[in-house]
Amino acid sequence: MNFSNNARTVLERRYLSKDIDGNVIETIEEMFKRVSDFVASGDLIYDEKANVEEISNQFYDVMINQEFIPNSPTLMNAGRELGQLSACFVLPVEDSMEGIFDAIKNSALIHKSGGGTGFSFSRLRPKGASVKSTGGVASGPISFMKVFNSATEAVKQGGTRRGANMGILRVDHPDIMEFIESKSDLNEITNFNISVGITEKFMEAVEKGEDYNLIDPHNGKITGKLNAKEVFERIIEMAWGSGEPGIIFLDRINNTSTVPGLGEMESTNPCGEQPLLPYESCNLGSINLAKMIKENPEGYQIDYDKLGQVVDASVHFLDNVIDVNKYPLPEIDEMTKKTRKIGLGVMGFADLLFYLGIPYNSQEAVEFAEDIMEFIDRRSKKKSEELAQVRGVFPAYEDSIFKEQGIKMRNATTTTIAPTGTISIIAGASSGIEPLFAISFVRHVMDDDKLLEVHPYFETIARKRGFYTEELMEKIAEEGTIAHMEEIPEDIRRIFVTAHDIIPFWHIKMQAAFQRHVDNAVSKTVNFTNDATQKDVEEVYRLAYKLGCKGVTIYRDGSRDNQVLSIKKKHPNMEPLTGNNIKPRQRPSITQGMTEKVRVGCGNLYITVNYDENGICEVFTNVGRAGGCPSQSEATSRLTSIALRSGMDVEKIIEQLKGIRCHSTLRQRATKKDIKVLSCPDAIGKALERVMNTYVEIENGNANEMIYEIEEEREEGKFVIKIEDTTQSSSGQCPECGYDVNHEGGCMICKNCGFSRCG
C-alpha cells in the first residue's frame, strides 16, 4: 500500500475501528474491506445471485489504490452499528415554533450520526412581526440561528467532532442586513457557515444601482426597500473582513434543477457544493485524478480508459450506498430514495497539472479542466443509464428533466465537486480542485521533531534536474512559493505554482470551468492575500455571477486569525466574586487541552482538561466501561468547570479534589504504567495539576507580533504562554495540533492531523 505516514495517522485517529478503551483494532486493509463488502451487498437487492465477492473486490481495489475515496461517514460507518453513510443533508425550517424545534431535534440526530446540515431560514417571519397565536412579536431568524448553533455545540458527530451547518437567508428577507452582519463577531454562531441567497432580480438591481423590495415570507407583503448596490457592498465588506457571508445564486440553482417538479431548493450542505431539496441527503465520493495518468516517452498523459473504469465503479458504489444506508429520519430515507442523487467529484487536480506540465493559472488549465470534467460527467451519466436498465429509474423520474429528454436515469444527479479535506490526505492528493497549498512544508511530529515533506513529483523533478538540496527545500517551506527563486529553472517555477501565486481571477475561471459539467455545485475557496481590497472581492463576486457559478466563498489571508492572547489575573469580562454576583464566563468556542487515561475502580477513566487564553476552563470525564459512579465523575467535572469559568483559583480546586479516597479504586491492581490515583476526584485533581504545570503554547495570528513570553508565578511551577510570530501562517492554526490550516469551502482543514471545522 502507498499510504503516507500522515494518511496512516489520520486513519488511525478518525476512521479505523477502536475498542471500548480507544485502542485501534482494525487495519487499513480491513477498513476498506469492511466498507467494500457492506456496500457491495446492495447488489443483492436487485439480483439475489449477484457475485457480491467480485463486486466487493472492484470497490476494494479502487479504494486501496487511492483511486476513489467515498465521503468520511461511509468510511467510518459502513458495516458498523451506526450505519449512517451520508455526508450532507438539508432540513426545512417551518415558520412555527413546532417546525423550528423539530428542525433542531432532527439536526441533532443528523450531527450525532456524522452528517452536516443545511438550512434556509427564509421562511421565518422577520423580527418584530406579530404572532397571532400568542399576541406577541417574532424574534426573527437570526435569534433562532443562535439556538440551532447552541444545539450543535452540545452534540458531537459520532462522538468525535462538532457538527457543521449552512445557514442561508434570501436577500429579499426583511432581516437580511442583520443576517449579513451576524458573524462580524467570530465568537457568535460558530457552528455555521452563512451565505446570502442571491436572486436574479437583486443582481439586476445591483447593476442598475436601484432599490429592491423586502418581502415578509409569512404573508408575502412588501415591508420595505433597500438599495441593492449598498447591500451588495455590505456583503463584500463583511466577507473581506471575515470570509463570510458567502453568496449562493438561488435562481441559478433552481433553474438547473433536474427534478423541478418536486419543488424549490432553498439551501445547500455546509460547504455549499450540494444544493438539496428539504429532507434530501446526498452521498459523495471523489476520484483521485493524480492516479489517472500513464507515462510514455513524451511524458505523462491522461489514461482515459482507466478513468472511465473508475467512474463506472464509483457510480455503482455510490448508488449502492443509497440502499444500504441507515438514514437518521424516515423523511430523509423517503426523499433520498425518491431522487437517488449521488455526487461524484475529483481531487488531485493540482497534482495532475504538475504531471502534465500545465500551470494552474493558465487558460490551458481552464480548458483542460472543462474537458476532463465533461468526460467524467458524461461517463457517469452513461453508467447511471446502464443501472437504470437493470434497477429502474429513480422514483421521481416523472418530475424530472430526463422524462422530457427521453433518457432513463438511475440517479437525478451524478456529479458534485466537494472540498475533500481529510479524504485527500488519505489519498495522498491535493484537495478537490484547489491549487496546492505548499510545495514543501515542515510537519511537526513527536517530541518536537520536525519532518520536512516535499511534494513527491517536485522532488523527483528537482533531483532529475539537479537542483535538489535539503537547504532549498527548507527555504521553500519557509517562504511558501518558488516564484522568485532564481536557483530553480524558470519552466519549473511556471508549472509548480501554489495558492500563494494565483490571483483570484484564475480561481473563479477554474470554478466556472468545472461548474459547466457538474450537476450540483462546486466547492471552491477564492484565496486573497492580506492586502487585497474590498474592490478585489467585489470583482470576484461579479465574475462568479457572470461566468455561471452557483455560489462563491472567499478567504482573505489572516482575516480570521486570532488576536494577541494573554493571561491575566482576572478576566476583564468576568463579574467579581462577591455577594450574589457570581456568573461564569461563557464556554469558549475553541479550546486546547490534554486527555489522559487512569485506572479507577470503575475501569478506565478518561480525563480531558481544556484551556483557552484565559486559563484552564473545563474538565470532561468519560468512563471506558459501565461502572459504579460515572455520574459522580461527570458531576465533579461539571462543577469543576463552572468553578473554573467563575474565576475560582485552580489551585484551590485542586486542593479540594486531591486526596479523596475510594475503596474500589484502592483495591484496583495498578500496573507500573498506570498513573497512581486514589479515586475519580483525586484523578481529576491531579490531571488539573499536571495541565496547570505544563507549558502551554498558544499561537498568535497577528503577523506583526514578535515572540515573547508571559509568565504567571504559581506556588508550584509556572504557567507560561508562548506567543509566536506567524508571518508565514496564511490561515491560522489547528486547535488540535497547532499546524497551519487551509480554508476550503468555508471550512478550515488541517493537513497535519485531519482536523476540520466548518463555521
Image (tube, helix red, strand yellow):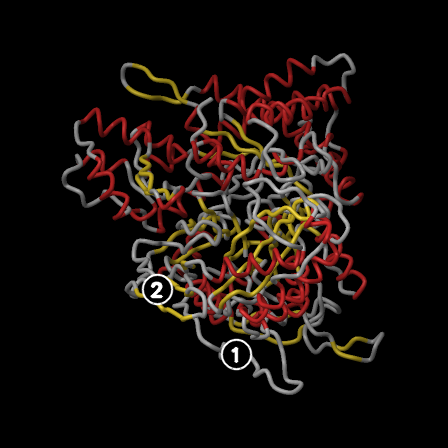
- Give the residue at x 49% y 62%: 692
Say what secondary structure mark 1 lies in: loop
Mark 1–mark 2 CB contact (< 8 Å): no
Q: Residue at x 52, y 57 (%)?
A: 247
Query: Which label belongs to residue 702?
Result: 2
Q: Mark 2 is on which residue type? A: Asn
- For mark 1, what is the residue? 573
Residue 223 in the image, given as x and y percentages of width and height? 66, 75
Task: Report the amino acid beneath label 1.
Answer: Asn
* Distance from the alpha carbon under mark 1 to that under mark 2: 22 Å
Mark 1 is surrounded, within 10 Å at the Cα level, by few (under 14), some (14 to 19) or many (20 or more) other residues, namely few
Query: Does residue 216 appear in this view?
Result: yes
Compared with residue 265, is residue 65 higher up or lower down, i.e. above or below?
above
Which quadrant holds residue 709? bottom left
Judged left or right of residue 653, residue 110 is right
Using the rendered view, name the quadrant where residue 530 is placed. bottom left
Considering only order in the chain, which callout, 2 or 1, is on the residue closer to the N terminus? Answer: 1
Label 2 crowd bin: few (<14), some (14–19), many (20+), radius 10 Å: many
| Relative image position of residue 727 (x, y in whole percent) | 30, 57
- The answer to which quarter of the image holds residue 46 is top right
Element type at mark 2: loop
